[in-house]
Image (cartoon, grey):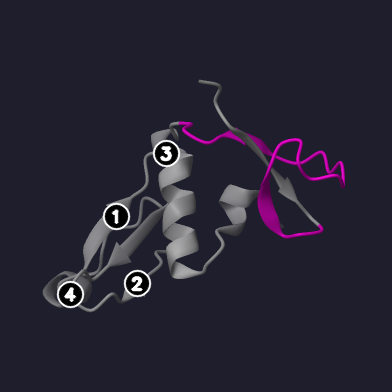
Amino acid sequence: MPIATFQYCQIHKTMENYPACTHNYAGIKRDSNAQLHPKDRPVVFENPQTGEVRYPARQDSPMMPGYKERGFERKEFTSYHEHQDWCKAHDVINHAAEGIK
């Protein structure tokens, strides 16, 4: 089974199946199951009971004690596909991961 490859399209502002997008934007191409290096892994602090999400300033930022007390958990995405699914479910875009400036 071939690995799906995606490319960011500046026109649609989404990841598109490569080469399905006809705008020929030479952007970032990623394998859908690509494992992310630990220093490149997106991190969020999420409260599983309430669904609240907090975004740390940096991936290596420790969680503030107040968040731990309120039930937040650190969530680190290990693959690009896992991160994409989470972003779609929460209707957000990680500009750094998608190559958007």
Q: Amino acid at mark 2?
A: Val
Per the image, label 4 sits on a secondary structure element best described as loop
Q: Position of residue 9 (x, y in %)?
A: 76, 51
The outermost residue toward the right is 23
**Disc nearer the start of the sequence (3/4):** 4
Q: Main secondary structure of the magenta part?
A: loop
Q: Amino acid at mark 3?
A: Ser
Numbered range of the magenta stretch: 11-34
Up-down relation of residue 66 to residue 75 (above or below)? below
* Res. 53 mark: 2
Q: Position of residue 77 (x, y in %)?
A: 37, 46
Quadrant location of residue 47? bottom left
- Marks 1 and 4 in Cβ contact (< 8 Å): no
The residue at which mark 4 appears reads as 49
* Distance in Å between CA atoms under marks 2 and 3: 19 Å
* Distance in Å between CA atoms under marks 1 and 2: 10 Å
The residue at which mark 3 appears reads as 79
Task: Tell me which residue sits at (48%, 60%) in the image.
Answer: 87
The residue at which mark 1 appears reads as 75
For the question of whether residue 57 can be seen, the reply is no
Specify whether 20 is left or right of 74.
right
Per the image, label 1 sits on a secondary structure element best described as strand
Up-down relation of residue 53 to residue 38 (above or below)? below
* Distance in Å between CA atoms under marks 3 and 1: 12 Å
Q: Position of residue 70 (x, y in %)?
A: 15, 78
**Disc nearer the start of the sequence (1/2):** 2
Q: Amino acid at mark 1?
A: Lys
